[in-house]
Image (spheres, rainbow, N blue to C red):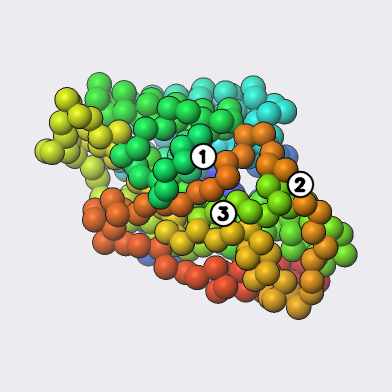
Amino acid sequence: MRVLVTGAAGFIGSRLSERLLERGDEVLGYDNLNAYYDPRLKAARLDRLLPHAGFTFVRAALEDRPALDAAFAQFAPQRVVNLAAQAGVRYSLENPHAYIDSNIVGFMNVLEACRHRGVEHLVYASSSSVYGANRKLPFDVADSVDHPVSMYAATKKANELMAHTYSHLFALPTTGLRFFTVYGPWGRPDMALFLFTRRILSGEPLDVFNHGHHTRDFTYIDDIVEGVIRTLDRIPGPDPDFDPLAPNPASSTAPYRVYNIGSHRPIQLLRYIEVLEDCLGRKAELRMLPLQPGDVPDTYADVQALQRDTGYTPSTPVEVGVRRFVEWYRGFYGS
């Protein structure tokens, strides 16, 4: 297939592009290589993709509608995976406009391009952050997600609503994927595992929010990518069991689906740090702090819908995933 991947120099996008190329797909990567975190890491990920004969790359932002339209016109993608977004919960408190530009305006441009170019299926990144103030665990895609606690979460919830509108009005098949705390080799430097590894190796204390008591459904990168591919290959149709008198938020009479992709095994942050200490062979100095604004105490994915429809359940234990990250980090940074 010809697959357009936005955010192709990002953590998930680069690994997804690699997997698609390995199985013989043509991939057009689209990324603006912005400086939200070190662009050199993005460039290094991209350098791994560029030698592939089936890979081409466009450097541009989603908000740049003429550039996005030109990419669609020239490549004529059959399917699209939209992973480009302004990420980060805490940064959304400092710079909310960046989230509107990329995650709302940019996603609108993606929807329009898919509609007018006859794309077979749009898969897009949502987030576990949409569950917001929910405390019923595990988080089920059939649960209401009407109480976001960050602008990042609000934009991801908006993406799901926008996608449904296009599925309903224009029969554009869309699938939203709520990712749960992705980690692994080539990960993002603003994520806990990356930050903690760097600080432990440099002898700096770790800022541990919520006194380390919150839990996260940490999900290994290859598990995430496998889930993306499984859903990309499965074009959704109208849900024959959809009941408008008792609507399921995760399906529709339109060709629309939403899935969780998580490990289904929440880990307390203090345990996560212990695993990292074991892999590094060093102890961490912990600086305990309260829960940060915009954060949620716990995340825990119910993945029954993903398993039912794709036959896939993420399975990498955190002990294995963290060890692989540490091996990559030491190799990449020489520490």
Q: CA distance from mark 3 to mark 2?
A: 15 Å
Residue 258 left/right relative to 195: left
Foreground mark, 3 or 1, reads: 3
**Foreground: 61 or 261?**
261
Residue 26 left/right relative to 129: left
Q: CA distance from mark 3 to mark 1?
A: 13 Å
Of pointers 3 and 2, the one earlier in the residue sequence: 3
Of pointers 1 and 2, the one earlier in the residue sequence: 1
Residue 136, given in percent of the width and then of the height, sits at 42, 43
State the image quarter where residue 141 is shown.
top left
Asked if one can make out residue 261 in the rendered structure from this viewpoint, the answer is yes
Foreground mark, 1 or 2, reads: 2
| Element under disc 3 | strand
Pointer 2 residue: 289
Quarter that holds the C terminus: bottom right
Residue at 43 percent of width and 27 percent of height: 146
83, above or below 24, in the image: above
**Foreground: 310 or 8?**
310
Pointer 3 residue: 215
